[in-house]
Amino acid sequence: MIVRLSTALDLPYRERNVLLRAAGFAGLYKQSELESEDIGLALRAFRRLMERHNPYPTFLLDRSWRILEVNESGSVFLSFCQTDVPQHDGLTVFDLFFDPAQLRPLIANWSECARHSIQRLHRESLELSDAEAIMQRLRRFPDVPEDWWAYDGSYAVRPVVPVQFRVGTSELSVFSLVTSLGTPTDVTSQELRLETLFPADKETERTLKEFSLKNKKPG
């Protein structure tokens, strides 16, 4: 009954295991290590997609939006924006977005995008604790209105919100597309996702391609 109900509600595998354990049963869906043989096929597919998505910046994320890997164009894009991905555990795409020392000062429409991101976080978190943990981290950054943090059921999350970057004399407009496995086999493979920044206009497309070619590694 629990499995049928979970399937009908299309609950994530992690949540299904929680319900099963709460009812006194063992979890049905395993959670593999990222570099395990079981998850290797999915991970190789994601890495191939990241390579194919060049010259568009692509980030491999886990369920808490932590950055696991970045493709070559992602590194080039962050370099172009005069920032680097700090090498420490737990960094999320939201940290890059909200931190005044990272991408935030370069985003012309930051207020619109930041509020949209918080509501997206509320709606897309696989577990409530994930959203709470990330927002607790983000609260340490300055100048974010307090009323933004609450879930707003009336807020209309738009399907596409272009982010407007201003870097020197260049202006870039990008939107994100999230890719996940259509047939995940366990908790880990279901929770992995790619977030790719696609150009929202011709000028941005030209700039990303030119900058990628200019900084392309030999071989």
Image (tube, rainbow, N blue to C red):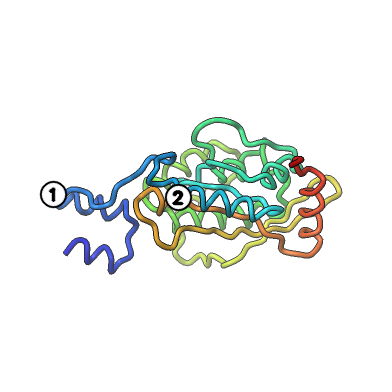
The quadrant of the picture occupied by the N terminus is: bottom left
Q: Quadrant of residue 71?
A: top right
In this picture, residue 14 sits left or right of residue 97? left
The percent position of residue 159, horizontal first and vertical second, equals 57, 67
- Depth order, front residue of 153/63: 63
Outermost left residue: 24
Circle 1 residue? 24
Q: Judge the density around disc 2: few (<14), some (14-19), many (≥20) Cα neighbours within 10 Å.
A: few
Instruction: Identify residue type, mark 1.
Output: Gly
Q: Position of residue 204 (x, y in %)?
A: 77, 58
Q: Which residue is situated farthest in the right direction here?
A: 169
Residue 146 bears which disc, if any? Answer: none
Percent coordinates x, y for residue 198 in the rendering: 67, 59
Residue 209 appears left or right of 134:
right
Looking at the image, residue 49 sits to the left or right of residue 77; the answer is left
Q: CA distance from mark 1 to mark 2?
A: 32 Å
Residue nearer the viewer, 127 or 219: 219
Quarter of image, res 56: bottom right
Q: Which residue is mark 2?
A: 41
Instruction: Residue lying at the far front in this picture: please name it.
Output: 219
Q: Residues within 10 Å of mark 1 (few under 14, many from 20)?
A: few
